[in-house]
Amino acid sequence: MQRCSWAQSNTLMQAYHDDEWCKPSYDERYIFEMLSLEGAQAGLSWQLILNKRSAYQTAFQNFDIEYCANLTPAELEHICISFPIVKNRNKIRSVQTNALAVQLLQKQYGSFADFLWAYVDYKPIDTKRPTANLPASTPLSEQISKDLKKCGFKFVGPIIIYSFLQAIGLVNDHESQCFCRLQQETF
C-alpha cells in the first residue's frame, strides 16, 4: 500500500495519514484540537507532537473549547509543569487565547467550521499533486492567517495554517499514487 512519502516513518504517522490527514472535518472540537496541535508544532516535528498528543488531550480536557477558554493563569502553569507536552509557555497560553477567539467566531458565524469552510465555499481544494513537493504556504493560508490574527489568534502564521488546512481537510494534498487519493477517486 503506497502512502504519501512523509507518512512512511512510523505507525503513528501512518495512522494519522490514513485516518485523519486531508479528511474534511466540521467537528468544532477536532478543528480546535488540530489548530492547537499545529501551533504547538511550530518549529518542531509533527511526529514529536503526535507522540505527545494524548498528553495534550488530557491536559486540555480533549480540547473542550469552553474548558480551554476558561483556563486560569495558574491552571495553564500547572499544565506546563505537570504534563509531558512542549514546555513553551506562549504556545500553552495560546490554547486559552485561541479558545476565546473561537468562541467569538462561533457567535459571529454560527461555528468555527463555518468561518473556515466559507473560504473554500464548503468544498475542499483538491491539489492533485503528483509528488510530495508541497508549498510551505499558499495565498489561502496567508489570507486565513491574516484574518485569524485580526481576531486575536496566536501561533497562526501562514505555514502553520497551511498544515492546519491539510489537517482538517480544507486542502487535499495526498500524492497522486497514495492509496488515500486513489480511494477518494473511486467514489
Image (cartoon, helix red, strand yellow):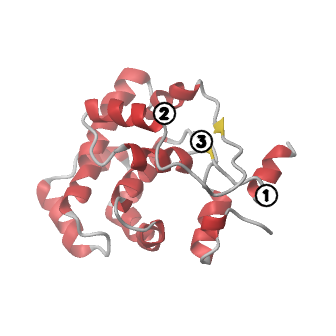
Q: Which of the 4 image quarters holds residue 62? A: bottom left
Q: Hey, what amino acid is under mark 1?
A: Gln
Q: CA distance from mark 2 to mark 3?
A: 10 Å
Task: Kindly identify which residue carries mark 3.
Answer: 171
- Tell me whether circle 2 and circle 3 mark residues in contact (CB < 8 Å): yes
Task: Kindly identify which residue carries mark 1.
Answer: 177
139 to the left or right of 169: left
Give the structural element (helix, strand or loop) at label 1. loop
Question: Can you tell which mark lies on residue 140?
Answer: 2
4 to the left or right of 51: right
Give me the residue at 40% from left, 63% from top.
Answer: 57
The nearer-to-camera label among 3 and 1 is 1
Coordinates of residue 46 in the picture (x, y in percent): 46, 65
Q: Is residue 25 above or below residue 4?
A: above
Label 2 Cα neighbours within 10 Å, binned few <14 / some 14-19 / many ≥20: some
Quadrant showing the N terminus? bottom right
Q: CA distance from mark 1 to mark 2?
A: 25 Å
Give me the residue at 42% from left, 23% from top.
Answer: 109
